[in-house]
Amino acid sequence: MTYSHLLKAITGTVAGLGIAVAAHAQTAWDMPTPYPANNFHTENIQQFAKDVEQATGGKLKITVHANGSLFKANEIKRAVQGGQAQIGELIISGLANEDPIYALDTVPFLATGYADSKKLWQSSKAAVEARLAKNGLKILYSVAWPPQGLYVKTPLSTIGDLKGMKIRSYSPTVARMIELMGGQPVTVQAADLTQALSTGVVSANLTSSATGYDTKSWEQLTYYYDLQAWLPKNIVFVSKKAFDALDQPSRDGLLKAAAAAEERGWKVSEEKTAWYIEQLKSHGMKVQPAPAALQAELLKVGEKMTAEWADKAGPDGQAILDAYRKLK
Ligand code: PCA
């Protein structure tokens, strides 16, 4: 070995050691999320990140990139799978084209309140976990959105009033429902929704009171029909590889913070629903339940979609539905 070779080898080793020491001192994770900074899910995530830093004695630092700013909503799963980010948030039903199991919590009128939504999660969590595990991903926690309803410009009396209307959707199942209602589904992620509404790309929206508030729906839309049709859920998930690379105390700290975030998130989601509805009203929106005729027609759409889902999801799906119905 020449002198310069020797020098290079030594320098390389020292540099390598330096990185190892730094990695041991602090691990930095990037966390792309789809929803705005002041959304309750995002605020919960910020608290979670703080808790993680504290619980790991500063060894694990998570930087949250909200509102699709690092990766767009539909890119987040792949980014974490591919190692461009280590942890992320997504809406489960956004993955419904990959597997029908992911569509379960957007089947209309299957679980319409928080208690049932929790039971539905209890019945389906293992199946969702198993599918994500195949992609090298691990769920840390899940939190439901407030119940979903319909934002429109003019009052509705029957499903016929939705004929041909361009209605914004955020997942394949939501798009299917819009289709069955006679509307024209247009997929728009939450981060692009305000613009899609103001430019007339869509003239109606199917979502929660929370997202209606986040996107100032009252600027374009007047009626909010509080259908309480389903409560979709977000998950916070991590790359299994990144998780396994943590030392045991850090893993424990992360899981502890995740459990606290799950409990806090469900509570805030439920408690804040009334507040969101109040905000919609105070900005002039007319908030009301669906008129009886419309409600009956929507329930039929729900029945059809439940049957379609069971058909697609096969025996795995049936087992989940049976478990859920036992809990109810
Ligand atoms: N808000 C999100 C998903 C469900 C919800 O309530 C959205 O509209 O994109």
Image (cartoon, rainbow, N blue to C red):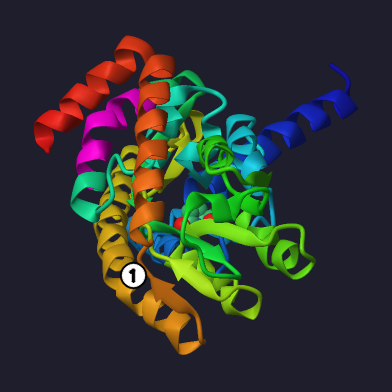
Q: From where the camera sits, is residue 18 visible? A: no
Badge 1 marks a residue whose secondary structure is helix
Image quarter where the C terminus lies is: top left
Question: Which of 314/12 is in front?
Answer: 314
Is 120 included in the stretch rendered in magenta? yes
Relative vertical location of residue 157 with respect to residue 318 in this rendering, above or below: below
Give residue 240's position: percent from left, percent from top: 46, 30
Is 265 included in the stretch rendered in magenta? no
> Which stretch appears magenta?
118-129
Q: Residues within 10 Å of mark 1 (few under 14, many from 20)?
A: some
The residue lying at 27 percent from left, 71 percent from top is 271
| Residue placed under numbered mark 1 in the picture | 273
Image quarter where the N terminus lies is: top right
From the viewer's perspective, is 27 left or right of 252?
A: right
Give residue 31's position: percent from left, percent from top: 56, 51
Residue labelled 1 has its Cβ within 8 Å of some atom of ligand 1:
no
Question: Which of 274/289 is in front?
Answer: 289
Give residue 133's position: percent from left, percent from top: 43, 23
The residue lying at 43 percent from left, 83 percent from top is 281
